[in-house]
Image: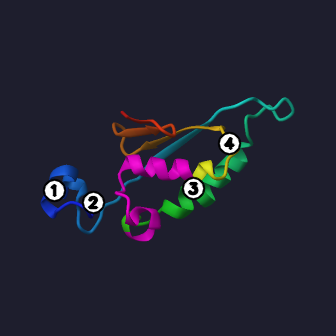
């Protein structure tokens, strides 16, 4: 965090406070909900959802990037798993029909998971 001293960052973020950065292999699960279309049998076309996730919300903007240096959103926002979930949620909200996005789960590790449902953040 730019608003904290080196000592405060080290105390708060521990081993994740590497001045040269560090990487994660996040796993992201996006859940949509809504009425099932009687013709298609789907809430939405999952091919479209996958394309949004690939091109505009997750892979293209975030994959193999130094979040703090390469992604403008994180120049002012600390790149925690919680804030990554918010970034993905906000990106998808702009693309999906209103009210269809239910939750975004970001798995940093098998034990560290953030679930974001718009206004509510759940850390497991």
Q: Which residue is mark 4?
A: 98
Q: Position of residue 23 (x, y in %)?
A: 35, 59
Is the C-beta separation of discs 4 and 1 under 8 Å? no
Q: Position of residue 104 (x, y in %)?
A: 51, 41
Q: How many marks?
A: 4
Mark 1 / mark 3, whichever is N-terminal: 1
Q: Which residues are magenta?
A: 69-90
Q: Nearer the viewer, residue 79 or 41?
A: 79
As drawn, 123 above or below 6: above
Label 1 crowd (10 A; few <14 / some 14-19 / many >=20):
few
As drawn, 80 above or below 104: below
Instruction: Give the image's coloring scheme.
Output: rainbow
Q: Which residue is mark 1?
A: 8
Q: Position of residue 20 (x, y in %)?
A: 26, 69
Q: Secondary structure at mark 3?
A: helix
Q: Which residue is mark 3?
A: 57
Mark 2 / mark 3, whichever is N-terminal: 2
Q: Which residue is mark 2?
A: 1
Outermost residue toward the right in this view: 39
Q: Is residue 17 left or right of residue 49?
A: left
As drawn, 19 above or below 52: below
CA–CA distance in space, label 2 to label 3 = 23 Å
């Amino acid at each position: 965090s730019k608003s904290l001293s080196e000592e405060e960052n080290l105390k708060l973020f521990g081993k994740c406070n590497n001045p040269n950065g560090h990487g994660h292999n996040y796993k992201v699960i996006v859940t949509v909900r809504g009425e099932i279309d009687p013709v298609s049998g789907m809430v939405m076309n999952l091919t479209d959802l996958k394309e949004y996730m690939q091109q505009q919300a997750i892979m293209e903007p975030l994959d193999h990037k130094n979040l703090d240096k390469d992604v403008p959103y994180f120049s002012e926002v600390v790149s925690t798993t919680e804030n990554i979930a918010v970034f993905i949620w906000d990106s998808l909200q702009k693309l999906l029909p209103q009210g269809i996005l239910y939750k975004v789960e970001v798995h940093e590790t098998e034990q560290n998971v953030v679930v974001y449902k718009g206004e509510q953040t759940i850390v497991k």
